[in-house]
Image (tube, grey):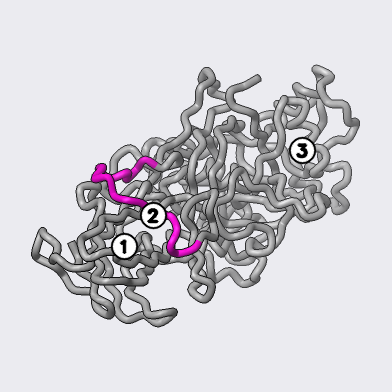
Amino acid sequence: MLALGAASLIPSCSPTAETRAQVLLVVDTDLPLAGSTDVVRVAAMDTLRVEVLSGESVLETRDLVLVDPSNWPLTLGVVSRARLRLRLFQARLVRPELTVDRLVDVQATGSGVERLRVTLSGDCFGRATDLASSTTCISMEQPEAKASEGIVADDGSPTRAASWRFAKDAPCTGEHDPLRPCVPGGFDVLGDVGLASMPTRRNEPLPLRTVVVSPFRMDRTEVTVGRFNSMLRAGLLSTSERPQERVTTSESRAYCTFVGETDSSADVLPLNCVSVGLARAVCAASGGRLPTEAEWEHAARRGDGRIYPWGNDGPSCCTTSVSRSPFASIPAGCPRGPVEPAGSHIGSGGTCPGGGDVSRDGIVDLGGSLAELTADDFRPVAECFPSGLLFDPKCVVTGRGPFVRKGTDWTAGAARTRAAYRGESTGLDVTGGFRCVYPEPAP
């Protein structure tokens, strides 16, 4: 227990409270902790910051490292009255977007000891306390409650740690499809502070975004030339448009992978030089659609905060298809050449970190090969996504582009293989392709 005076934060060795006006404030959380098992790792907290306030001024601060569920709930002894600011976060990444921030006004009402309880909820990720108005987030239903609200009588119950409804993955329920693996849904964090130095404000994947994504299925590979030709032969596409026909330069057309619906020589290559409209048509004819940026990044990282789709080991020439540009004046160290067949960097004889460009769910080429179209308009993150927890977010400002494209491509440098990297596209790129997502369970 910690005893808090009117202006100090003092460790207390006594298990019993003094017989005077006092509140024992029991602080709990429904979030998972760093010591919890079988939880979404990016939601696991480890540090509680307790501040004693006078109005908006901080009188004293204590950071408590509480990684084990057995450390919770924590009891604070408040003598007479106190204003406390409680912030729960991960010490390795102290960001307001990933902090649960709770303001609590407590006051003893009698001469004895009163036990009260507050719970720091994951519903309040990224919602900052307003000290001037004394408002604070309590839950999804009360994002701007008074600091005196949400304080209940303590019933002595054990901790609620890891009971948050998004503390664990939302599992897939349909049958396994190796061509369209299911990506479990759940909580995730989009963005990467490691990309904060990108040269343009629009490219910076900050602020971070806390999201909840529903389960979905995703193409294991980018749409290939062979798949597109099969759809043409089966009469599944209502559009007469063909890849590359709108590409204007002969130099670019030379690197377009579609060479005609009767020519199967390029069937194993991912399809590029595709307009946004044609990509949408292919997905619709397949029973799907283009992924949102949140879905794409969730598929690449899926709740464990990994830097790359295959993990945290940096990329190499065998890990993923990058740095192969035949246009580069300075060789990047990887073999030069055109786009490679889909799935060329799986396993590689066990010599590549993580076994190649393969995600947790068996989806390939999210790191390299072709950069991939999404359904989101390309806008600065702060412009399109409000603070707080977002559910299946999608950025649509005009719906006419440019659009976010995720991942990097066979010509680009390895630095862009980070899963949070975001570029822009209007389609028709020799370096750009797409894959589709589908509902789960499949209809």
Q: Can residue 431 be seen in the rendering of this structure?
A: no
Kind of residue indicated by mark 3: Ala
Numbered mark located on residue 422 in the image: none
Check if mark 1's residue and mark 3's residue have beta carbons within 8 Å.
Answer: no
- Mark 3 crowdedness (10 Å alpha carbons): few <14, some 14-19, many ≥20: many
Q: Residue furthest left?
A: 14
Residue with the mark numbered 2: 120
On screen, 380 above or below 338? below
Query: How far across and down, in percent of the image, does residue 371 sit?
Result: 65, 48
| Residue numbers of the magenta segment | 146-163
Q: Tell me the CA gap for discs 2 and 1.
A: 10 Å
Instruction: Tell which tag, 1 or 3, sits nearer the viewer.
Output: 1
| Residue occupying the point 72% across, 25% down | 287
Numbered mark located on residue 48 in the image: 1
Residue with the mark numbered 3: 279
- Mark 1 crowdedness (10 Å alpha carbons): few <14, some 14-19, many ≥20: many
Earlier along the polypeptide chain: callout 2 or callout 1?
Answer: 1
